[in-house]
Amino acid sequence: MQKIKFKSFVLVIPILIFSGISFYFFSLIFSTLKFDVSKNKKSRETKYSYVISSSDNKILSKLSRKFEIDNSYHEIPFFLKHSFISSEDKRFYKHNGIDLKSISRALIQNIRSGYVKEGGSTITQQVARLLFLNNDLSFQRKIKEIFISLILEFRYNKNQILKLYLNNIYLGSGAYGINEAAQVYFGKFIEELTISEIALIAGLAPAPSIYSPYQNLELAIKNRNKVLESMYVDGYISLANKNKAIKEKIKLNYQTTDNFLDDKLLINFILQETDKKLEVKMIISF
């Protein structure tokens, strides 16, 4: 009788473990599939592009809206798209969220160098971290990241995933997304950025604080040149374009601390009033 009870107990344990693991992954799948990009707090989505000028025609602020995920007509500029693909995930359009070749290459490079030199994460994996996880270096987090990446590739197409990435990636100096980075570093719309400026921003992705042009312009330019070289090797820019971009002098959008707070308060007030007027206009039109 005791043997029968013991056997039953031994059988129950793996069933409970399997049930627990199944429930965990089912919850993960369900939460990822029902995720609503428009309600994502990290996204800080801008509804429109804007330019705010003073009475003497001095531009106070200029910001592009974030990329519309479900709008196929709202395209990512060619050089911007391929600067990040070339520097962050060359096989982006070939893998299904996980790139075993990149992971293997990164592992070999890290073993040779004796420290973590390359991460091997795809753009999809970075989106999984940005939207659902954090940067904790744990095995459990990595398993979640891989699993969510596969689900993201199932739910969204490549351009949508790239838009999610460019809308949410932190690029330093308080800039979340490429649109805010274009504003912070150059005071421009995304479409106004030169190849050189795009490459500099793309070069911030691995470590925004280390490569910040405000902290170390020389290092930021050095990393920009690496991105330009990668784009050239991958066939996204010509040799003439690469050389021209390398020679281009970087003109940063420096803003003094004296007027930054006042400008920010004024801009936020103007945007709040604009939102109110737009809402009233939409109600009247209906």
Image (tube, grey):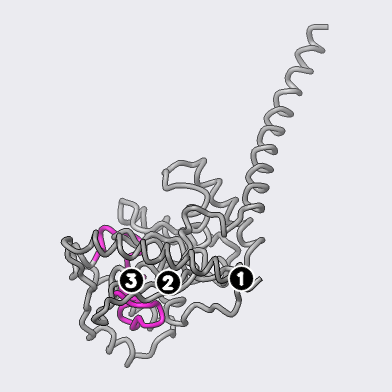
Report the mark closest to the observer, 2 or 3.
3
**In the rendered image, which quarter contains the N terminus?**
top right
Disc marking residue 183:
3
Q: CA distance from mark 3 to mark 1?
A: 33 Å
Q: Quadrant of residue 93?
A: bottom right
Q: Which residue is mark 2?
A: 84
Q: CA distance from mark 2 to mark 3?
A: 18 Å
Q: Position of residue 58 (x, y in %)?
A: 25, 79
Amino acid on which disc 1 is placed: Ile
Report the mark closest to the observer, 3 or 1.
1
Callout 1: 10 Å neighbours few (<14), some, many (20+)? few
The answer to whether residue 113 is visible is yes
Q: Position of residue 28 (x, y in %)?
A: 63, 45
Callout 2: 10 Å neighbours few (<14), some, many (20+)? many
**Range drawn in magenta:** 187-212
Q: Is residue 136 above or below residue 157?
A: above
**In the rendered image, which quarter contains the C terminus?**
bottom right
Q: Nearer the viewer, residue 33 or 228?
A: 33
Q: Position of residue 144 (x, y in %)?
A: 55, 46
Q: Residue at x 33, y 65 (%)?
A: 267
* Total marks in image: 3
